[in-house]
Amino acid sequence: MDELITLYHGSEKIIEHPTFGKGKQNNDFGLGFYCTESNELAKEWAVSSLRNGFSNRYTLDTEYLNILNLNSPDYTILNWIAVLVAHRLFPIKTPVARRAKQYLIEHFGINVNAYDLITGYRADDSYFDYAEAFLNNGISVEQLARAMRLGKLGEQIVIKSKFAFSRLNHEGFDLAEKNLYYVLRKARNDEANKLYLDMLEEESDGLYIQDIMRGGITNNDPRIPRNLSE
């Protein structure tokens, strides 16, 4: 990552001064300011079917920041999902899912609050459906890793610490028109769902969450997919 990077935040508002400590505790990686390096993706995230939005543009000086890149080869798909289930609120409908959540947090969890900046996949509705299917022993870890690439739903960069917020500068904004970007957002999501359903028709002999728990499998097992980025 270059020391000075450009980030975009999709919102229904123009946000000139992002504030440390504000936002939702139950976002993917906990409290933070969620951005992307793609202006077009930020515009998709900014709109709904009913309203326009804005892609706020920032520069961030990353020198001296402690950065966690969950999409690097240092981490596995299960590190990402462990962080996700530790923060997101969702119904636990089966005993398997309850045990799986606890196992993932204990064996693959990461203290994201120890970092200034985090890069990882964005768990929108489609991604979270995939994660829930994995927790319920419905798809294998190999299928989960493949699902994370479906439709190219996007990576996010999350500013976590007060120090990182102090190095963020607002540089302007672009209007995101709902008539254009909601269509693109929906098409991206629909493509991911179609590819996911096609994948489910394929047979998979890989590792399921019950296999992982029964085998006491941990992060250093070579069967756990690494390096989510393409």
Image (cartoon, rainbow, N blue to C red):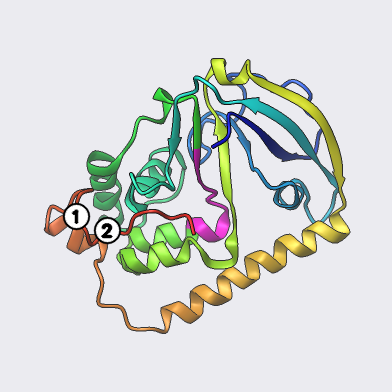
| Residue plotted at (61% across, 20% down) | 165
Residues 7 and 25: in front is 7
| Residue plotted at (32% across, 63% down) | 141
Position of residue 109 in the picture relative to residue 35 (left or right): left
| Residue plotted at (39% across, 63% down) | 144
Q: Is residue 59 above or below residue 84?
A: above
Position of residue 91 in the picture relative to residue 27 (left or right): left
Q: Is residue 194 above or below residue 105?
A: below
Please, what secondary structure does the residue beneath circle 1 have?
loop
Position of residue 22 in the picture relative to residue 219 (left or right): right
Give the residues drawn in magenta, as a range.
Answer: 119-128
**Amino acid type of the residue tagged 1 in the rendering:** Asp
29 magenta-colored: no
123 magenta-colored: yes
Instruction: Work out how far the residue at label 2 is from the one at label 1, CA to CA, in angstroms.
Output: 6 Å
Residue density around tag 1, few if under 14, some if 14–19, many if 20 or more, within 10 Å:
few
Relative image position of residue 188 (x, y in whole percent): 66, 65
Residues 96 and 223: in front is 223
**Amino acid type of the residue tagged 2 in the rendering:** Ile
Residue density around tag 2, few if under 14, some if 14–19, many if 20 or more, within 10 Å:
some
Relative image position of residue 110 (x, y in whole percent): 33, 35
Relative image position of residue 97 (x, y in whole percent): 30, 55
The residue labelled by disc 1 is: 221
The residue labelled by disc 2 is: 224
| Residue plotted at (75% across, 63% down) | 184
Are dots 2 and 1 in contact, CB under 8 Å?
A: yes
Q: Residue 37 sits in which quadrant?
A: top right
Q: Residue 95's mark?
A: none
